[in-house]
Image: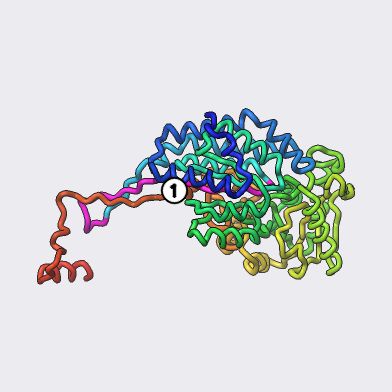
Amino acid sequence: MNASEPAASKATDAEAFKRVFERMHAATRRSALVERASRQARLDALAALVHDNAERFVTAISADFGHRSAHETRLLELFPSLESIRHTRSHFGAWMKPQRKAASIWFRPGRARIIPQPLGVVGIIVPWNYPLFLAVSPLAAALAAGNRVMIKMSEFTPRAGELLAELVARYFAADDVAVVLGDAAVGADFARLPFDHLLFTGSTRVGHDIMRMAADNLTPVTLELGGKSPAIIGPDYPMAKAAERIMVGKLLNAGQTCIAPDYVLVPAGREQAFLDAARAVVAKCFPELATTPDYTSIVNDRHFQRLKGYVTDAQERGARIEPLSTSMPDEERRKLPPLALLNVDDNMRVMQDEIFGPLLPVLPYQDLDAAIAYVNQHPRPLALYCFENDAGRRDRVLNETVAGGVTVNDTILHIAQEELPFGGVGPSGMGHYHGIEGFRTFSKQKAVFYQSALNGMSLFNPPYGALFDRLTKFLIR
């Protein structure tokens, strides 16, 4: 579809995108009904946008990072974006059908239904670490639910934002989808708009601010935050296998992933075995880490210096720094080789903040009780990884900890399951999306009761008397 007003899809100042919002809002209030064919056309346009411009996104995102592995962009952004759209297109027709519900026995033969309806205008605030996937996946859900959508892209990935804005203007009508570009001040103005729902993906710190700003309009929010996601290696689990899956998950996007393993709990006395196995994985996956195109740069100097600051702070407080690669840091290209940190404690910044980089604290534990207790003494994480073949111990970890999502005997993969809800808990977020959960998040599940022509409600009309008393006595017996 061609935009009737292409410029409206790339709003960069508060007044411009407020006008876009007002037009979208007015359109949703003129008619709440959005036919299946319209939703299908918008999803088809989104699929074409991503598929036809895949390599342009690879190039733009790499430029934003200084260097982003093209293979990782294809695997971690293009594939899941298209898979999310495919899954949504296959199922949204069934999702949008009214659902029969059982009416209370006292009100039969009346009938009950739930009718999913579009909320109206949805706002999506996209982070810099996966600028395509974390825009497209919630966008697909919001469009399937029949909404109009405004997207705020991160100022840290300006080329990806500019490209998405250009393509949205080409593939969508201006009042269907719009892209907003700009800095944190623009983002704050965006969050203050009276959306019908606002989804934010980013840090817990900024999540507090977003929720406060949305509260002024009583805008419901879905917060996809981060936190410190632990990996627990069971006492009998093969160390080499655990280290491989942990390090591969950790080093995707150079650790700049919200569900990357943030620290690893290993059985006491096996720390060196983990370090040896981790070094072998890094050497195999990135034999020339300093020059390989497979290893991603840190997104900007601010974050590069932040990560260096974690290492310095930890070292000054008694941590032991263990390089996992023979390569040295490259400040100019912002390549930071992976480091393990031992002898860490909660007073260190690296154990207080979400790391979002290739640093991996390694903590020993004496027994499973201690490992579970450590996780539970800290804010509930967005993800948890359990490496354990013993069903009893595995179930203890699953049942006695609370996390947004879990992958057993691997990392990251639960986010790729469209039939599973994705979302945090407490400080790591609230609300869910992916698959039908995204459709429900961006829909109003409207409850409807159909009264039957034959019913007994008149027996409860005033003036109240003996019959009313007998009936109510029976009901509350």
* 392 within the magenta span: no
Q: Quadrant of residue 2?
A: top right
Residue drawn at 50 percent across, 51 percent down: 195
Residue drawn at 40 percent across, 36 percent down: 35
Crowding at dot 1, Cα within 10 Å, few <14 / some 14-19 / many 20+, comes out as: many
**Front residue (pair 193, 416):** 193
What residue did someone put label 1 on? 119
Q: Quadrant of residue 229?
A: bottom right
Residue type at mark 1?
Leu
The region drawn magenta spans 104-129
Whole-percent x and y of residue 90?
48, 34
**Front residue (pair 388, 362):** 362
Residue 176 vertical placement versus 218 (above, below): above
Residue occupying the far left of the picture: 466
Mark yes or no: residue 358 visible. Answer: yes
**Front residue (pair 454, 62):** 62
Mark yes or no: residue 273 visible. Answer: no
* 114 within the magenta span: yes
Whole-percent x and y of residue 376?
62, 67
Q: Secondary structure at mark 1?
A: loop
